[in-house]
Amino acid sequence: MATVLRRGLDPGAGAIRDGAAGQPPPAAIGREDEPPPGLGFDPVRFGLLAFMVTVSMLFVSFTSAYVVRRAAADWAPLALPPLLYLNTLLLVASSFTLECARRSRGARHLWLVTTAALAAGFMLGQLGAWGQLAELGFFLASNPHSSFFYMLTGVHGLHLVGGFSWLLVLVPRSAQGALAPESPALGRLAIFWHFLTALWLYLLLLLFVI
Amino acid sequence: MSHTATAHADEGHAHGAPQAFIWRYVFSKDHKVIGIQYYVTAMLMALIAGVLAMLVRLQLGFPNSTFPLLEKFFPAGFAGGVMDPAFYTMLFTMHGTIMVFFVLSTAPVSGFGNILIPLQVGARDMAFPFLNGLSYWTFLPGCIVILSSFFVGAGAASGGWTAYPPLSAVKQAAPGSQTGQTLWIIGMVFFIASFTMGGLNFLTTILNLRTKGLSLLRLPMTMWAMLLVAILGLLAFPALTGAALMLLFDRHFGTSFFIPAGEVFNNTPLAGNHQGGSPLLWQHLFWFLGHPEVYILMLPALGFTSDLLSTFSRKAIFGYKSMVGAMVAIASLSFIVWGHHMFVSGMSPYIAMVFATGTILIAVPSAVKVFNWLATLYQSRIHFTTPMLWALGVVSLFISGGLSGIWLAQGAPDIQLHDTYFVVAHFHLIMAGAALFGVFGATAFWFPKMFGRLMNESLGKLHFWFTFVAYYCTFFPMHYIGIAGHMRRIYAISPPTGFYEYLRPMEPINHFITLSAFVLGSSQLIFFVNFFWSAFKGKPAGENPWQANGLEWTTQSPPPHGNWAGAIPEVHRWPYDYSVPGAPQDYLMQTDPAPIGAKAH
């Protein structure tokens, strides 16, 4: 191996070591001051947090578009479809029940099923809100506010479908008792789910309050 | 504690490599295979985008000639042997799109990032191998969608790589604004999704899977670049995702995010009920991504250059911490300067001043990098290997491209120079050129870790000198014609086909540029020959052919599945300990125990 090294290198430059693999590993090199590996943080949880940051940036860019677009003369604000109050309640409740599932020992499966039911209720309710608006004659292209309403609820809904599928993976596993008491998988799902709940509260504020 | 105590548990790789061809080389989850897949795909995309550029130059260099031969290849684009102007706009649009996203973001970041990150941080693989494989198999459909747009109805997108509405938002605006633009958007969404998956992997791997002893300030500059690039991508790309979604809605569902009222195309008022949309909104969202994006291209090249300069001058990199600081500063500033792409958009001069100030500030960390590189080279005995030549080329292009950036950063000169060939010269030198040279340097340097062999040095040097000279001959004169008023994205400048008699004196220069571009384009064939020949027939490299000292050089070439046959090595110093006084050789591996030499970094 060592002979290949000299190709392209100036052979006279410095002392060139012979074995490409370097020295044999020293016997004992424990050093107290060596930094610990990594961040000492669950990599999956870290990756999930980074993903939530990038999703947040998506909604930050939508927000800036919303703020710019709202200043145009053709802006016609929609009235809040009352069904959204119920949907919001369902989603907040699903966050609560998921947290109960995470802490519960005996009734975890029941809490998870309740969470899934509430989440399904929220998604159906969002579709219902779309239907209510459409009945009033507000479609995607009707005015800029309705465009943003459909788009933002749609993009939020897609992320929620992702979280919901994740939940549906965990439900049968909890039925089989395959989830550990301090299940990291459930903990991660809870982080993402609360994020989506918070995101929905933010969108509600952005679309109808601010 | 014994040396065999490794930082990571190895359970993930206890099973060994998958044996079936399809799982081992096609749907692989091994970062090295994925990296090579990304790299090779990007280089093939580069070949296509390069041909597009050659056709653009053909038209500019020979505006009044006919090419009956080309009609056989492009019956619609070269009807009667003359290039169709609409075809020309597709050429430069797709050249830019493919080169920026599918080549120069992909080869250095997704390609070398994947190959190098686990090797340089001492990990068995990326943090999320499945996500990594999925990311490539999201990228490839993106490539296919983008390329397929050439073959649909009216052809590929033609609104420029920046896809400004209303040109990109209204189907009847141009032939390329029909299905081609839709496919452009879909291709970009695939690309962004794959880049996001990659970014999550990069960030998590570099921060969480470093081996014992590898603190952040012992990372090679390449790893710093990858870390920052991952952060930039995760923060900036969502702006384009959002904008692309809104553009899609405007195009297909009748919304008015970007389309204002009263649009008229070909004397026909725009159908539908569009009003109130803001084309400027797209520009802001696009460039909020777009400016960090050009640093996504640049930073890996700057990282490679630092590592290569240090290795081949057999000297520690000068000012490591200031180099890291400069990169962090460049990356941070990139988020607050996007407005300098929009000085002619009617922006208030006071706001333009803010953007200009931020942009000029970038010159400070950039200069820090250049002076540190020069200080690294100062009084060293330089080994002029192929990778070193490319690294020196990056330094050269970074300086010459950076100087024109100072002009363009300021509102007043930019209003004169905006959308002229001066801009084309600037970004081809600094962004495209430096990134491309960085990729070539990295390819020559890390080829052993990709294929276990060395690239041919003679062919490599030949390729470098042809490329270097032809690159300057192609792009340097563009400064001059740009100052003279030659606009970019123009089909022909002077009569009979063009409109601007005052640009006629630029035609001989255009002619020269085109000939240089042809030399530049054809000399890339040397690289492709060298690449494929060396991958199969090159000289076996051995573990550490360059006598470099990073972690990746402590394992076999190519590294086995799981990267180290035995335990993952422990790190005791930074990767720049060359010519340490008192050391037995002129380099100390990162894994050598600390007491050797003067001090452990």
Image (tube, coloured by chain):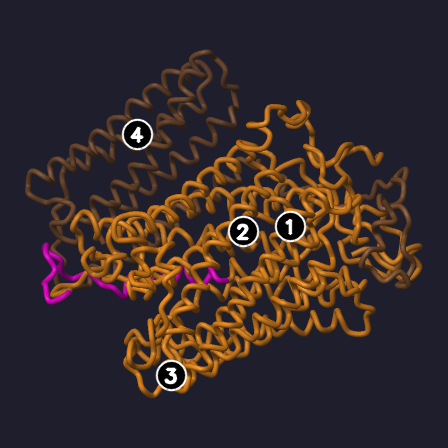
Residue A112 position (above or below residue B6): above
Q: Which residue is mark 1?
A: B531
Labels 2 and 4 positioned on one and the same chain: no
State the CA–CA distance, disc 2 to disc 1. 11 Å
Residue B251 place in picture, x, y as percent = 21, 52
Q: Give the chain of mark 2.
A: B
Q: Quadrant of the N terminus of chain A?
A: top right
Q: Which residues are magenta?
A: B266-294
Left or right: B420 as drawn, with respect to B383: left
Q: Quadrant of residue A94?
A: top left
| Three-letter amino acid code at the position of disc 2 | Met
Badge 3 and badge 2 both on one subunit: yes
**Quick check: do tags 3 and 4 share a chain?**
no
Sequence-wise, the earlier of marks 3 and 1 is 3
Asked whether B371 or B497 is in front, the reply is: B497
| Secondary structure category for the residue under label 1 | helix
Kind of residue at disc 4: Ala
**Tag 1: amino acid:** Phe
Choose mark 4 or mark 1, whichever is in front: 1
Camera-side mark, 2 or 1: 1
Q: Chain of mark 4?
A: A
Quarter where residue B3 is shown:
top right
Q: What residue is shown with label 4?
A: A93
Q: Is residue A72 left or right of residue B312?
A: left
Residue that numbered label 2 is attached to: B43
Question: Which color is chain B depicted in?
Answer: orange
Residue A82, relative to residue B90: is it above or below?
above
Coordinates of residue B474 in the picture (x, y in percent): 52, 73
- Number of other residues with Cα within 10 Å of mark 4, as a class: few under 14, some 14 to 19, many 20 or more: some
- Chain letter of the residue beneath label 1 in the structure image: B
Image chain in brown:
A
